Amino acid sequence: MAKASSRKAKIPAKATKARHPRSIVQRKDISIPISVFGNVMKQFDSAAGKLKLDPSLREFMKVPRRSTIVNLPVQMDDGSFRIFTAYRVQHSIARGPAKGGIRYHPDVTLDEVQALASWMTFKCAVVNIPFGGGKGGVVCDPHKLSQGELERLTRRYVADMMDMFGPDRDVPAPDVGTGPRVMGWFMDTYSMREGHSVPGVVTGKPINLGGSRGRVEATGRGVMISTREAAKHLKLHLNGATASVQGFGNVGSVSAKLLHDLGVKFVYISDVNGAIHDSDGIDVHELIAYVEKNKTVVGFPGVKKVKPDDVLFADVDILIPAALENQITDRNARKINCKILAEGANGPTTPEADVILEKKGVLVIPDILCNAGGVTVSYFEWVQNRIGYFWSEEEVNRRLEEKMVAAFNDVLTMSLQHKVSMRIAAFMLAITRVLEVVQLRGIYA
Ligand code: NAD
């Protein structure tokens, strides 16, 4: 003991300053990092408390059933080898195979992947699809890797965890930093090892490889549908309503485009490089074309460049955080100035911020409802792969509309009945649905 503490004392002051990854936000007032998984557990506990859930069942439903960490050797283009740390977490398989994306990002941590996997369990239950929850991640910056390096990394990831995946076991999908191209390599590697094509092992594939029509736009479409339903509930007219969106990637841009088409005026938009503002409303279609070419919203002609925080604190009817976790915390929630907060991203709001927003009367559409359109169409993709027959985009969108509206109404009813926020209501609904299955199956213990 004495030896260890004397070693600790020699560490220079500079080295003791931990650099916290993005998922762990370092608060300036007290130096305790915010754990994203800790946030999910707090959300779960609030809802479980309302349901008076038995403590041992509560524990069983909270902890991830399996967390795997692997270190993947990958040959780089210059012939050298690099090791990439990678994760796959299966939170629950009670309602069906684990389902959840794979994230490629330099700040991926086990804490973040466990949080995202847990949200998937509850998200799938909210939209009532027969999946459990899973998530994966690789610590890497995909923008700094060549196509060849990305392909070798993806194939090695699949090969190292081959026995975990499968259409009836664990079905990944894209997340931040991955997309249809990566899912194509995933499907091919798995299929090569099985000796035949297995399209249902992964969703979010290119259409020609068995992907579903409507999948690329599904999450944004779900955000649009739930925002529209929330506006209906608040008697807020969308035509002429104002909005801002943080993050203009897949989810942010599609949500903005579809809401813009319903008459919503987007006055603030940001991405990782900066933020833009136009009080007359930004032409979202033109901005999408601009971003396709320039890879950023910055420099879009005819708008003002503003501070990134202006997007979050704008006086608007609708705010859509569509970037990353822990953006709205107890440090800035008081400055939020919107009627509807539609969580396109996973975990943008901390539980402490939720309390402040509730007092302010902001209607928060929680991530496990708001962005569930993506996993819903992933489920449709998996179904189409299994029956070997593919639906038209209209058919996919019609079924998505049905699922999202039903889920929104189920959560709203729970919220009004129990006088709780939409987030706690969504968790209560999800826990009830998972619990029903757990009790029917019994616990093999
Ligand atoms: P993406 O990589 O396509 O886009 C992310 C966007 O956020 C980019 O525009 C990026 O520039 C921006 N961004 C990053 N850091 C930012 C910052 N600090 N400030 C402002 N903007 C920032 O990713 P995506 O697929 O759109 O996912 C976004 C969020 O939605 C993630 O939380 C993801 O888990 C969640 N989500 C995605 C899907 C899906 O189907 N793609 C489904 C459910 C949830």
Image (cartoon, grey):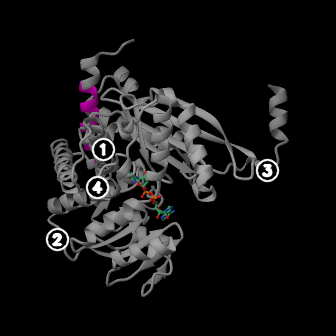
Query: Mark 4 — residue?
Result: 214
Q: Position of residue 243 (x, y in %)?
A: 31, 71
- Asked if 401 appears above or below 158 in the picture, the reply is below
The residue nearer to you, when weighing 14 against 122, is 122
* Residue type, numbered disc 2: His
Q: Please say if the residues under marks 2 and 1 sit with CB atoms less than 8 Å apart.
A: no
* Residue type, numbered disc 3: Ala
Query: Mark 2 — residue?
Result: 237
Q: Position of residue 227 (x, y in %)?
A: 24, 60
* Residue type, numbered disc 1: Glu
Q: Residues within 10 Å of mark 3 (few under 14, many from 20)?
A: few
Tag of residue 381? 1
* Residue type, numbered disc 4: Gly
Query: Mark 3 — residue?
Result: 13
Q: At numbered mark 3, what does the secondary structure look like: helix, strand or loop?
A: helix
Question: Which numbered disc, 2 or 1, marks the residue that appears first in the sequence?
Answer: 2
Q: Position of residue 94 (x, y in %)?
A: 33, 26
Question: Which numbered disc, 4 or 1, marks the residue that appears first in the sequence?
Answer: 4
Query: Looking at the image, which residue is at 45% across and 26% down?
Result: 65
Q: Is residue 435 magenta?
A: yes
User: Quick one: quadrant of the C terminus?
Assistant: top left
Q: Which residues are magenta?
A: 423-436
